Amino acid sequence: MSRATKATLIKLLTHTLFLALLYVLQSMVFSGLRIFGASPLIIPLAVVGVAIFQGAGWGGGFGIAAGVMCDIAFSETTILFTVSLTILGSAVGLLADFFLARGFPSFLLCCVISLLIIAFLQMFAFLMFYDVDKIILLRTGLLQTLYSCLFVVPVYNISRRLSRRQRTL
Amino acid sequence: MKEFIKGKGLLIGIIAVVISAVTLVSAYFASDKSSVFANTVGVVMHPVEKGIASGVGLLEDLYGYMYNYDLIVEENEALKEENARLAELEREAEAAIDENSQLRQQLDLKERTLTYDTENATVTSWTASNWGSSFTISKGSSNNIEVDDPVIDSAGNLVGQVTEVGATWATVSTVYDTSTNLGATAGGDVSAMAIGDFNLMKQGQLRLSYVPSGSSLVIGDTVLTSGAGEVFPRGLVIGEIADVQKEPSGATDYAVIEPATDFASLSLVFVIKEFEFIE
């Protein structure tokens, strides 16, 4: 096995483990840690982290896998996360490849924008097809975004460590 | 950027479209309404979920024993008193059943009994979604559980409905989830619809809609399933009326239902796989 193949396999394995850990936390742990009735979304943060540090290719690829896992974790969505996280991963990766500095401020900005987009997509069906108080929808979306932002620092550190590890291999 | 779009970008796009198509098609055509990916991940992660659930349960039991001992003793005393009261009620009920049986014989009325085949399952995890209310249970299609099966608690109160089934797991949407839409009767004579409402879901409640204006509903009235549509058996307790309001149009009223199930401590549920009324 060539050194490059071995490095790619290790990279795939570490990212798979990272995603599995996030899935367990997202679907089995955070459901019991609600604040004001809201629970956080952490998988999209990891997509942004991988995209920022490893570019559009890995960002998009990780986005697909993360999206599938999110759609499985949240039974009310079928392909919403698969599509949106793939697009977000690729878009953030492209921005990082050409325009953005690969640092914490860019990561934080991209996370907040991504979380707001996802919250809007999640509330879209309620806005369109149900008679729901828009203030309550907005409150839910904002709470979800703010609570998720609490996990920006640990996800940033793990994403950065993962990318550094690959470079040293 | 053009290189990415023509190279990896195109490949990623194709993979995403294929996965989305497979998910949609398999979820649409599968009898259990779970996609091939959801079923696979569900089967693999199910032991982890069960392990975490039992670990959390153990910690809660330990915490309860260490810090809530006085409360447990108090609860035990209250349960003893309730047990004595129930024993007295049982004696009265036996007499009433005998009397009812004799009166039926005199009037030549056939007895109508609801029987159902249930499967017990434990709650393994709650959804982390902020836009719906559901939980996963420890049994699935391998135990003949199907989508749309009603789910009740140990007291026979309606908990929700199975919305997705994998081989060893199933997702149950709670009765106050926004997907709920079932026929109900309240206060003995009012027929209406129990409907999930996003605003009320946040408080663990649901809505009783299309209540005829000026009905005799009062706070505390029991809301039961009507059996309309034959998805839910008639007579399951949904909850009780917590509030009665007039619809903005003024033509009908609506009520807020407080579910009878204590969802905070729900750990064991019963899936009704089949039911019938025997005469």
Image: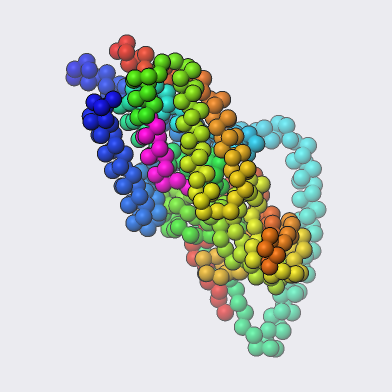
Q: Is residue A45 above or below residue B215?
A: above
Q: Nearer the viewer, residue B200 or B139?
A: B200
**Main secondary structure found in the magenta portion:** helix
> Which part of the image, by quadrant, shows the C terminus of chain A?
top left
Residue situated furthest left in the rendering = A1
Q: Which contiguous range is marked in magenta?
A: A76-89
Q: Nearer the viewer, residue B249 or B226?
A: B249
Q: Is A97 contained in the magenta span?
A: no
Q: Nearer the viewer, residue A129 or B116?
A: A129
Q: Residue at x 55, y 32 (%)?
A: A145
Looking at the rendered structure, the number of numbered marks drawn on it comes to 0
Q: Which residue is drawn at 68% across and 68% down?
A: B251
x%, y% of residue B157?
A: 63, 58
Is residue B108 in view? yes
Q: In this view, does B117 lie above or below B259?
A: below
x%, y% of residue A140?
A: 59, 39
Q: Is residue B84 left or right of residue A118?
A: right
Q: Which residue is drawn at 70% across and 65% down?
A: B250
Q: Nearer the viewer, residue A99 or B240?
A: A99
x%, y% of residue B198?
A: 60, 49
Is residue B224 in view? no
Q: Is A84 contained in the magenta span?
A: yes
x%, y% of residue B130?
A: 56, 41
> Which part of the image, by quadrant, shows the N terminus of chain A?
top left
